[in-house]
Amino acid sequence: MSNTFKIGLIASTHLPKLGGMQIVNHLLAQKSIRESDLRFTIMSPVDGFKSKDYGYDFIKLRKLSYVTHRWYLEQIKWFSRYNGFNILHGSMLNMGGYLAMKASQELNKPCIVHSHGGDVQVEASIGYGATLQNHVKERIVKTINYSDKIIAVSSLNKNNIIELGANPDKVEIIHNPVLAKEISEVPFQDMRIKYKISPDEFVIMTLGRNHPVKRMKLLFKAIKKLKHLRIKCICIGPKGDYERLLNDYNIKEQVILTGMIPSVPKLQLELPNSELINTMKACDIFVSTSYVEAFSGAALEALACGIPIVVGKKHGVCDVIEENMNGYFFNDQISNPDNQLANLLESLYYKRSELNNRSLAIAKSVANLTVENSLHQLSGIYHSTV
């Protein structure tokens, strides 16, 4: 173990079942035990995480009333000295990244910070974006200026960071991994039977909660224009007020609300989740109408299932899209994007057999985005920084 490279990974939360940044950190920490010389200890104030269930080290940071931020720093410094971390790695530039940067300055240790999109992306038209708050923007700019290296998850994410003043040479892109091999090995279950979908129906899939940045109304408007076709849309995520929206657009017959998948969280984390993967495989195409997505894990999983994706231009997953092969773009910057989206979906409806025949090639297009490759890239950055 003398050659082991120890990383203290700081995150504001760590519940892998919730996906996103948390699942990426989980995969890196878990896979590194067997696949590399890196060893991660995740430090987070989150409740309910049990390290013994996952095999890697976890330290719960304790809260302390109104001086919590300073108290977090003191704990991070103490655990860093005690564990002999070679480097600090902070997730999200306004949260774990900021704490990692502050602690590294006081410890005189190198610091890597990792953006996951939500910290630097903005859609001012709906008031979305952490940097719209001046005090948060100041924190992010300090993190950018005083960290040794910054990891972005896509070209879009990198550009957002550079717009905030980062030296481009300081920003490295490491795409989030996807468990493509494991997804290909999930036992098949025909979910069309469960949801009473006919074999000849064209099925659109989308995933996410009804948050303004997800812009679900845009998709529902497009589906309303396609009611003359044999189309269904599977909408995965919290139902929220979706029932009301379906009534408003008169598309209750076209849209299936699954709720969360799995509906009841399992005691042990199942990756990939077989119910979710088989639901994806029951679909013909994945659509995201979000204003902006740094590097969508749901879109990646859809590609790994062999399903082409439809996204707007402000999606980091564009990095892995070969247009008209594994993905399609619609212009979401025009005045009536629902018309263009509806026209694109109708054209794909008539290409269903062609899309299905392309399934293996689509899955192969993201097969290189493995956790092992992410660890290899990270290892190079860590060793070059120390």
Image: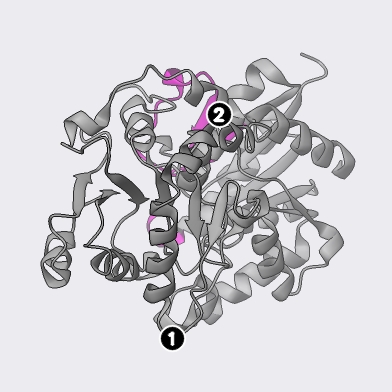
Q: How is the image coloured?
A: one colour
Residue 131 location, quadrant: bottom right
Q: Which amino acid does label 1 sit on?
A: Ser
From this view, report whether residue 281 is shown above or below residue 151. Answer: above
Residue 179, image x, y percentages = 54, 29
Q: What element carries label 2?
A: helix
Residue 105 location, quadrant: bottom right
Q: Visible in this render: residue 55?
A: yes
Residue 99, image x, y percentages = 61, 55
Residue in the picture at 65% in, 48% down: 320
From this view, report whether residue 276 is shown above or below residue 231. Answer: above
Q: In this view, does 30 lie to the left or right of 246?
A: right
Which label belongs to residue 335?
1
Q: Quadrant of the C terminus?
A: top right
Q: Comparing marks 1 and 2, which lies closer to the viewer? A: 1
Residue bearing mark 2: 180
Q: Magenta segment, which residues?
A: 41-67
- State the residue in front, 302 or 327: 327
Residue in the picture at 55% in, 37% down: 358
From this view, report whether residue 368 is shown above or below residue 343. Answer: above
Q: Is residue 105 left or right of residue 25?
A: right
Q: Does the magenta stretch include residue 50?
A: yes
Q: Is mark 1 on a helix, strand or loop?
A: loop
Q: In this view, does 144 lie to the left or right of 317?
A: right
Residue in the picture at 56% in, 52% down: 327
- How many dots with numbers? 2
Distance from the alpha carbon under mark 1 to that under mark 2: 37 Å
- State the residue in front, 30 or 370: 370
Q: In this view, does 215 lie to the left or right of 99?
A: left
